[in-house]
Amino acid sequence: MPAETGEQALIARIRERLPTSPEWVRVGIGDDAAVVEAERSTFEVLTTDTLVEGIHWDPRFCSPADVGHKSLTVNLSDLAAMGAKPRAALLSLSLPSSWTRDTVDGFTEGFAAAAREHGVAVVGGNITATRGPAVINVTLTGSVRPRRALLRSGARAGDALYVTGSVGAALAGLLWLQDHPSPGEPADPGLAECVRRYRRPVPRVRIGSLFGRNRAASACMDLSDGLADAVRQVAEASGTGARIIGEQLPIPPAAREVFEARGKDPILSAAAGGDDYELLLAVPPRKKRAAEALQRLSRGVPLTLIGEVTGDGRTVLVRGGQVEEIPQGFSHF
Amino acid sequence: MPAETGEQALIARIRERLPTSPEWVRVGIGDDAAVVEAERSTFEVLTTDTLVEGIHWDPRFCSPADVGHKSLTVNLSDLAAMGAKPRAALLSLSLPSSWTRDTVDGFTEGFAAAAREHGVAVVGGNITATRGPAVINVTLTGSVRPRRALLRSGARAGDALYVTGSVGAALAGLLWLQDHPSPGEPADPGLAECVRRYRRPVPRVRIGSLFGRNRAASACMDLSDGLADAVRQVAEASGTGARIIGEQLPIPPAAREVFEARGKDPILSAAAGGDDYELLLAVPPRKKRAAEALQRLSRGVPLTLIGEVTGDGRTVLVRGGQVEEIPQGFSHF
């Protein structure tokens, strides 16, 4: 908690930097609770996520604005994975005295930018002091039409598995930053893009929502804990297996180089690496054309076929004709 | 984060101790986000609150179950202050390695008990590790009929000010516990009740909802940061003043003794003390009878007339005929 300012002053400061709330927010920040009007004929989607300083970000190479942006983005990614449209956010900050007013301003700038990009109304929150590292908690609500939510559990044997964007970029960016702990960016454009994917992930809200509305996917999950983890979780929730083809993973060349330079296997690294806020989508055979049509609407977000759902209960990675168990996903523990 | 168990195992452990979800929870814990069906013809109410170990509770005299109970209760109190009915909660835990599996089980027991008492469905959450103190964040949703929400801003000069229950009990309980830092309770029943009010506050959900549904209050706020703070905030939001009569504050005799034994002024202490999860209600003259009728429905929760809303913009405390400024509320900073 910045020493020079109390809770009320800090709330006022954050509030004036946030986007104006739409009319469906009947009571916003400043009362005991917020009051919002639901969207007609929709279900509500609710998610929450926490970032802890020193665990989820390193202040040597993530700016307060990066953290603010990411704290909302990780929740936007969860809504994207449900095919939901984001609506309202609540922001809870537990701040140590090392956070100055400038740190809070920087954080708010990044948070507000992500809120504006996705039309999210910030309707409430909480600020408290802590003697430990900063802890940022964001809860996000969204809406989805009945029977249009994308669950983890709907995959069936024979469905194709697609992934949006690329995999491994965020981990490669993180590895580079850990070796170059500063606010800067690498000169190489491919590597710089990896670093940006780590610092400012782009949630796949539009493509998730398109797949949900058009019922073009039987299951979906985001890759926050890595592709391997997502594949295993979707298979487990669906009571199926899955087979991923290593050579088909969309690993950016710059990420591949980062892994190779460190003696790491590029495919295993990309599959196990966390912080890729991409979507894993299971697409039934009869929806293949619909999925291809949706990709054309997705504003250039690549959609890559990486494998299929199987009936044997195993989650495997195939490469060079060899079959191996899918590696463990990323874990903070 | 308990060392002996990973995130997934811990989530499963917590989950099996929580109440079963009602049918309107379409997707609960275990997917990227929860999906809930809204209640017809209502607005949604959203609130969030955070408890930090060492700041909001002292583990020497608050058990993990107390903390679990309180982490939901403080949010229930915010909904009560809006006249809203609680529905769904999300629980985010940032846990240090000092939290063993038993600590988490104790916490969950208290949290689940509060959820059961108030019919709250726990639909999601998050667990992460931290190197600092434990941070517990709870987000709670509720429902309120249009034009039935109790805001802070509706008070008008001439409205009577009431408070539910008692004031000062929680602070007195805390003061006693700070002098006797153990899990025990004092032998004196009045003092033991103060300690219980601190450890396990009772949110005034029923009486808040009754006042909202019957439009019997023009403004309402909970006393989480103390009566003085609530009076000032309601007056400020309403563009009014307020006058509180010191002798009328419902201070329990045991609390009065605690303050006096420590050389503190009982009225100022009770007014400034935080952690009383009671409600401050402004009642227009024409609603006085309705308010009295509601009190009879409120299952024995006392409702005490403590002052009135004024038009002069000042918030004052009157006692022994002397007028003084209302003391500053409790602050964690």
Image: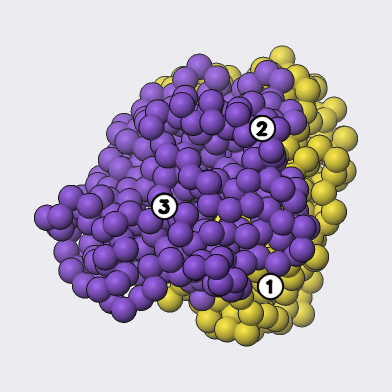
Chain colours: A purple, B yellow
* Residue B81 shown left or right of residue B301 in the figure: left
Q: What is the three-letter code of the residue carrying label 2?
A: Lys
Question: Residue drawn 46% across and 69% down?
Answer: A268
Element carrying mark 1:
helix
Element carrying mark 3:
loop
The quarter holding residue A235 reads bottom right
**What is the CA distance from the residue labelled 1 to the residue labelled 3?**
31 Å
Q: Nearer the viewer, residue B227 or A234?
A: A234
Identify the residue under disc 3.
Answer: A250
Question: Residue drawn 22% across and 52% down?
Answer: A190
User: x, y percentage for residue A74?
Assistant: 46, 49
Query: Crowding at label 2, few (<14), some or many (≥20) Cα neighbours within 10 Å?
Result: some
Query: Crowding at label 1, few (<14), some or many (≥20) Cα neighbours within 10 Å?
Result: few
Identify the residue under disc 1.
Answer: B9
Please give the chain letter of the residue carrying mark 3. A
Of tags 2 and 1, the one toward the viewer is 2
- Is residue B185 placed above or below B252 in the rendered structure? below
The quarter holding residue B159 reads top right
The quarter holding residue B18 reads bottom right
Task: Specify whether disc 2 shares its chain with disc 3.
Answer: yes
